Amino acid sequence: MLDLDELLKPDNNRSKSIDRAGTFDQKSGSSRRPIVWSGKIDSKKQRLHSVILGVVGLLAAVLATQVWSANDARTTVVVAANDLAPGEVITASDIKLIEADLISTMFEQRSDVVGQRVREQVLADEPVLMSDLGDGIELPEGLVVSGLSVRPGAYPAVDLVPGDSVDVTGVNPVTGVAELIADDVQIFSVGTSGFGTDELFISVAVSPAQSLRIANSVNQAEGVRIALRAQSDS
């Protein structure tokens, strides 16, 4: 015969089993399993955070490398302490050192420049370039150095060098007619633009009047032309 009191008596073992498995729903008579926190959302956040930190770190490293490279390219270069005229011999007081981006045509040591003769005019605070220096020619008294740019085809297809004698022709801005504006003048220096063109920059030793005519002709659309004179045997 069933004992009602025995059935109603709580079973400790059964209660522990239900507690381990979940809660017991008295209405449905079934147990509900507890909600287990898997931690997946936290893991995703952590991974995203790690990725962001990694990207920021990479960008910082790249930026640091670029800054280091830029600073590494800077060094001391020689610049003019005052205006340097063609024919002048450079002394220690004529130059100074500043920090700048190094270009292959610049000088880094004072000793590389002191005692050298100036071929091209160098203004104060401008870098002294290799093309600015050289023996050139001695500038006779009463002459000046006039610079002019010559387009491809307007100069001989030979290497022009300092000391060569040339004739300079150009268009007269008043008459519009080509004429000889400086004859038998010596080249003081020759250089290029450095930008991949065949344009020449030539300095010639001329009289002040010839320098004025050259300046007027250079400003014309036709520019100037250079003709090389034969070298004398004497």
Image (spheres, rainbow, N blue to C red):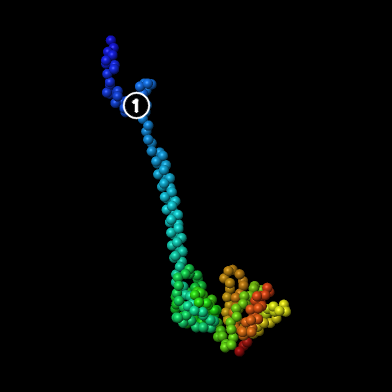
Q: Is residue 147 above or below residue 26?
A: below
Q: Residue furthest top?
A: 1
The local secondary structure at tag 1 comes to strand
Instruction: Tell me the quarter of the picture where residue 5 sits.
Output: top left
In the figure, is residue 95 to the left or right of 32? right
Whole-percent x and y of residue 126?
A: 51, 74
Give the labeled residue for mark 1: 23
Is residue 151 toward the left or the right of residue 99 in the image? right
Q: List x then y, in percent, for residue 230.
A: 64, 84
**Along the viewing direction, whichever of 217 and 184 lies nearer the viewer:** 217
The part of the image, by quadrant, that contains residue 131 is bottom right
Within 10 angstroms of label 1, few (less than 14), some, or many (20 or more) residues? Answer: some
Q: Residue at 53%, 77% (x, y): give it.
A: 122
In which quarter of the view is residue 207 placed? bottom right
Where residue 220 sits: x, y (%)? 67, 75
Residue nearer the viewer, 159 or 168: 168
Q: Amino acid at mark 1?
A: Thr
The tally of labels here is 1
Q: Residue at x 45, y 72 (%)?
A: 98
Residue lying at the far bottom in this picture: please name it: 234
Query: Is residue 57 placed above or below 168 in the rendered structure?
Result: above
Q: Is residue 229 visible?
A: no
In the image, what residue occupies the spot 27% across and 13% down?
A: 3
Image quadrant for the N terminus? top left
Look at the image and tell me in which quarter the C terminus lies.
bottom right
Picture residue at 40% right of the left edge, 41% below the top? 43
Q: Is residue 126 left or right of residue 197?
A: left
Examine the rendering and report whether any part of residue 146 can be seen.
yes
